[in-house]
Amino acid sequence: MSRGVWTHAGGYVNQPRRRMDKATRRRVFITVGILAAIVFGLYLYTVISHVRA
Amino acid sequence: MSITVSELDYDDHKPQRFLDRWVLTTSHKDIGTLYLVFSLAMFFIGGAMAMVIRAELFQPGLSLVDPHFFNQMTTMHALIMIFGAVMPAFVGLANWLIPMQIGAPDMALPRMNNWSFWLLPFAFLMLLATLVMPGGGPASGWTLYPPLSLQTGMALPFLIFAIHVAGLSSIMGAINIIATILNLRAPGMTLMKMPLFVWTWLITSFLLIAVMPVLAGAVTMLLTDAYFGTSFFSAAGGGDPVMYQHIFWFFGHPEVYIMILPAFGIVSAIIPAFARKPLFGYASMVYATAAIAFLSFIVWAHHMFTVGMPTAGILFFMYATMLIAVPTGVKVFNWVATMWRGAMTFETPMLFSIAFVVLFTIGGLSGIMLAIAPADFQYHDTYFVVAHFHYVLVTGSVFAIFAAVYYWIPKWTGVMYNEFLGKVHFWLSVVSVNVLFFPQHFLGLAGMPRRTADYALQFAEWNMISSIGGFAFGATQLLFLYIVIRCMRGQGEPAPARSWEGAEGLEWELPSPAPHHTFAKPPVIK
């Protein structure tokens, strides 16, 4: 659950330059890293497990 | 779930230039709109293909198009409706609603969100372009079974690349949704306080993560079989074409639930609002959704009972499939129990939701009939299957999307849609869709095969009736387009913040239309 507050470093010009607080950002990257590893792993496993000489 | 919001933070500054607003956007709301508009365009392109199919089948004989082109139409109709219309529509709804419903300022990865969307138009332009290539587009059915799919010709690599790109888009969307829900919920928004739509999308995202790479692997192997001399699925080279079917359906069956679980979430939001009662059995709804998702991984071979599996395998997949009726039944019971003795009113979103409950259940029951292996030997590859999955996907998924658009469009555009026109759209849709698909049960039981441009004379009457229903359903959707365009142009009664009397949730605390930036400071939920 988000405990951090988002700040607006650049204000509302075009798109806001939002920064998550450090702890939330860290958790987001860990989540993405784990999920991306699962995706690549499943893709490679699907192909490689069917390879026979 | 009761929510008290302590503090609302929003701002309505929007980028001024078209390029910044719509092409380079990182706003979850604008990306949601892009997804929904794209999905609507694909719905009409795929729908036009369905009209060609029904026109050819209006009477027996090869009357309108070449049979090879007919097969391209059935294949492309499915690919476009599944990957181009239904899935992007749900992702669009997720983009619009999930951050607002959990009190987050945006998706966790806004730039990747932009990229996920903009991959899609390229993927589908490439897919549609195959129709004008020498040899035509893919014509082997959306399942792309080898060896038939390997005879596709020049379109094959384009098709496979389009599937890879669309799959990549889905995977990135799913990662974004999971990262958002797990990390950006407002303080006090515990998992068991989340709206059901958020819950169903969280579970759907895990399904996407688990099965899209498997589809990518399957079509990669098709590509190497076609162009790099491998024999994954060629018996002549020591491979196994049936293995493709196993791999494809390990993706394909959860894919069905990817297209229906968010619909469950939508209906679970709308029915309580118009019954003016809290959802009956919230926790059981969450657990039932998770149970359906788990079971969806262990039932894939019910799509291939006729390939010659061992009896033990057939029995396992038959009983596992029937087991899905239990959590699904829990859901249907809960929706009915929510309506029971509620102070119900029947605005268009509620009408579509009630039709969803009734007609999706018909699709579910014909699914149980198909799960019975000895019976499936008769029904397999007949129009009964076509009737079954169209009840699930049209009167299920598409009706839920209609319901969602009518329910949340006041929040998106700031105006109410025209209720009279909405009801006309509902009644014309619900009558015509049943005229379209119900007779297909009879055709299938009588033995009419699917994916055929011609048929025996005995099937003529029901096919003509089905086609009339198809034309009526197709024409009715132009009315939906008109209703939506009117709202997008701001024509209609101004919508209040809480557009529906019984609506619950954080999004209804915000003004209508929702400001461009919401919840930059997270609200506190008590």
Image (cartoon, grey):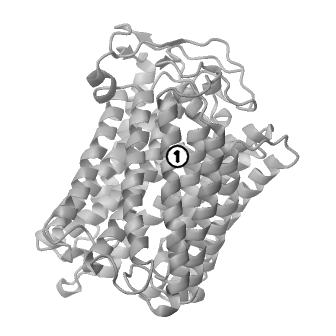
Q: Is residue B9 left or right of residue B40?
A: right
Camera-side residue of A46 and B201 = B201
Please, what secondary structure does the residue beneath circle 1 have?
helix
Question: Residue at 77% of width from left, 57% of height from top?
Answer: B333
Residue B420, above or below B15:
below
Packing grade of label 1 (10 A; few <14, some 14-19, many >=20) is some
Place of residue B359 in the rendered image (x, y in percent of width and height, measured from the top left): 66, 62
Q: Is residue B346 left or right of residue A1?
A: right
Residue farthest toward the right in the current orientation of the protein: B341
Residue B495, above or below A47:
above
Place of residue B466 in the rendered image (x, y in percent of width and height, measured from the top left): 53, 74
- The answer to which image quadrant residue B33 occupies is top left
Q: Is residue B375 left or right of residue B453?
A: right
Place of residue B183 in the rendered image (x, y in percent of width and height, measured from the top left): 49, 29
Mark 1 chain: B
Question: Residue at 67% of width from left, 21% of height from top?
Answer: B525
Q: Considering the image in quadrants, where does the N terminus of chain B appear? A: top right
Q: Considering the image in quadrants, where does the C terminus of chain B appear? A: top right
Question: Residue at 53% of width from left, 33% of height from top?
Answer: B98
- The answer to which image quadrant residue B469 occupies is bottom right
Place of residue A16 in the rendered image (x, y in percent of width and height, measured from the top left): 37, 14
- The answer to which image quadrant residue B127 occupies is bottom left
The count of marks equals 1
Q: Which residue is mark 1?
A: B480
Residue B124, above or below A35:
below
